[in-house]
Image (tube, rainbow, N blue to C red):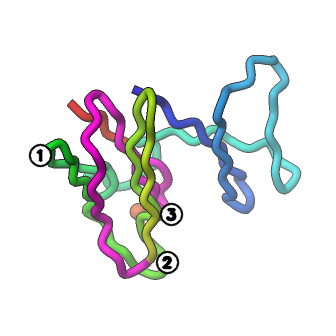
């Protein structure tokens, strides 16, 4: 399992991904004059069922879906599968269907990102 580390600007909501965590005690990333905040998965007060990715495994592939609206101002921006040695991300646009097929990877983690409700995840069993 691999944790995805991201930080968000509380003002403009820009996102950065951390490839490696800094261990110094004053590590701060800032944007718009403020410290960026850690993005935690499944932490937003929004419908769990509409954001957490669901999946189906078949023939060494995994079909991942998010049961979410795909409107101009509210949609799933991407779905990803993250594992120890590889990761895959598929990006969506409004009016598309938030559904994608990846190679199946045992013990990987699925992530989905809603433009309004942030990061969601599900571990593959
Ligand atoms: Fe949402």
Please give the name of the residue rendered at 37% of the width and 81% of the height, measured from the top-left corner. 95
Element at badge 3?
loop
- 56 left or right, relative to 36: left
Q: CA distance from mark 3 to mark 2?
A: 8 Å
Q: Position of residue 109 (x, y in %)?
A: 36, 36
In primary-sequence order, the first of circles 2 and 1 is 1
Q: Quadrant of ligand 1?
A: bottom left
Front-lying residue, 22 or 51 = 22
Element at badge 1?
loop
Mark 3, ligand 1, within 8 Å: the answer is: yes
> Farthest left residue?
58
Mark 1, ligand 1, within 8 Å: the answer is: no
Mark 2, ligand 1, within 8 Å: the answer is: no
Instruction: Name above or below for residue 29 compared with residue 69.
Output: above
Magenta stretch in the rendered image? 94-119
Q: Which mark is residue 116?
A: 3
């Amino acid at each position: 399992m691999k944790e995805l580390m991201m930080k968000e600007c509380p003002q403009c909501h820009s996102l950065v991904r951390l490839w490696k965590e800094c261990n110094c005690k004053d590590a701060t990333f800032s944007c718009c004059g403020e410290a960026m905040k850690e993005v935690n998965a499944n932490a937003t007060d929004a419908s769990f069922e509409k954001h957490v990715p669901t999946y189906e495994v078949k023939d060494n592939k995994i079909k991942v879906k998010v049961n979410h609206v795909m409107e101009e101002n509210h949609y799933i921006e991407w779905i990803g599968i993250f594992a120890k040695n590889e990761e895959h991300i598929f990006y969506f646009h409004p009016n598309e269907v938030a559904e994608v097929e990846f190679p199946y990877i045992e013990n990987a983690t699925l992530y989905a990102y809603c433009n309004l409700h942030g990061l969601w995840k599900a571990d593959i069993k």
